[in-house]
């Protein structure tokens, strides 16, 4: 007879949902770096830095999108185990992705001048 340990239980739907939302939140940092690099590789982005022709986007707008993204990340990460994510939690994930995309768009628009 074999002394193999019992198989590990499959991760719950709530755990998979939390992992997806965590990745959506954490990938904002490398995505921002990529957007900045791509913007600086363009002629307008270089002119923005060298000549100061960047678009004037208010700083509180950046902070508001990051605050919404952080709130949505916290909302999705508090999904309880034992039950599938509710429609409100799924809307939180959609809000997180939307806030991330809006932030990246604002960063790209800043360099587009």
Image (cartoon, helix red, strand yellow):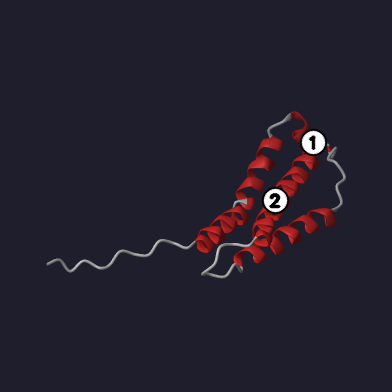
Crowdedness near tag 2: few (<14), some (14–19) or many (≥20) residues, C-alpha within 10 Å: many
Which label was assigned to residue 11?
Answer: none
Element at label 1:
helix
Q: Name the residue: 58% across, 59% down.
A: 22
The residue that label 1 is drawn on is 112
Q: Nearer the viewer, mark 2 or mark 1?
A: 2
From the viewer's perspective, is 10 left or right of 28? left
Q: Nearer the viewer, residue 108 or 95?
A: 95
Q: Residue furthest top?
A: 43
Q: Quadrant of residue 59?
A: bottom right
Q: Quadrant of residue 11?
A: bottom left
Which label was assigned to residue 100?
Answer: 2
Q: Name the residue: 83% across, 37% down.
A: 113
Residue 36 picture location, percent across and down: 69, 42
Residue 80 picture location, percent across and down: 57, 70
The answer to whether residue 32 is above or below residue 10 is above
Element at label 2:
helix
Asked if labels 1 and 2 touch by Cβ distance under 8 angstroms, the answer is no
Q: Name the residue: 68% across, 55% down.
A: 96
Residue 40 picture location, percent across and down: 70, 37
The answer to whether residue 2 is above or below residue 33 is below
Q: Nearer the viewer, residue 66 or 47?
A: 66
Q: Spatial distance from mark 2 to mark 1, Cα to Cα?
A: 18 Å
From the viewer's perspective, is 53 left or right of 93? right
Q: Nearer the viewer, residue 35 or 4?
A: 4
Residue 38 picture location, percent across and down: 67, 36
Crowdedness near tag 1: few (<14), some (14–19) or many (≥20) residues, C-alpha within 10 Å: some
Q: Quadrant of the N terminus?
A: bottom left
């Amino acid at each position: 007879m074999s002394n193999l340990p019992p198989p590990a239980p499959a991760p719950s739907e709530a755990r998979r949902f939390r992992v997806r939302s965590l990745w959506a939140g954490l990938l904002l940092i490398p995505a921002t770096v990529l957007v900045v690099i791509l913007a600086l590789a363009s002629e307008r982005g270089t002119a923005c830095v060298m000549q100061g022709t960047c678009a004037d986007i208010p700083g509180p707008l950046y902070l508001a999108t990051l605050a919404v993204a952080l709130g949505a990340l916290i909302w999705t990460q508090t999904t309880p185990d034992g039950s599938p994510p509710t429609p409100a939690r799924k809307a939180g994930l959609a809000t997180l992705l939307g806030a991330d995309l809006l932030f990246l768009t604002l960063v790209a628009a800043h360099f587009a001048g």
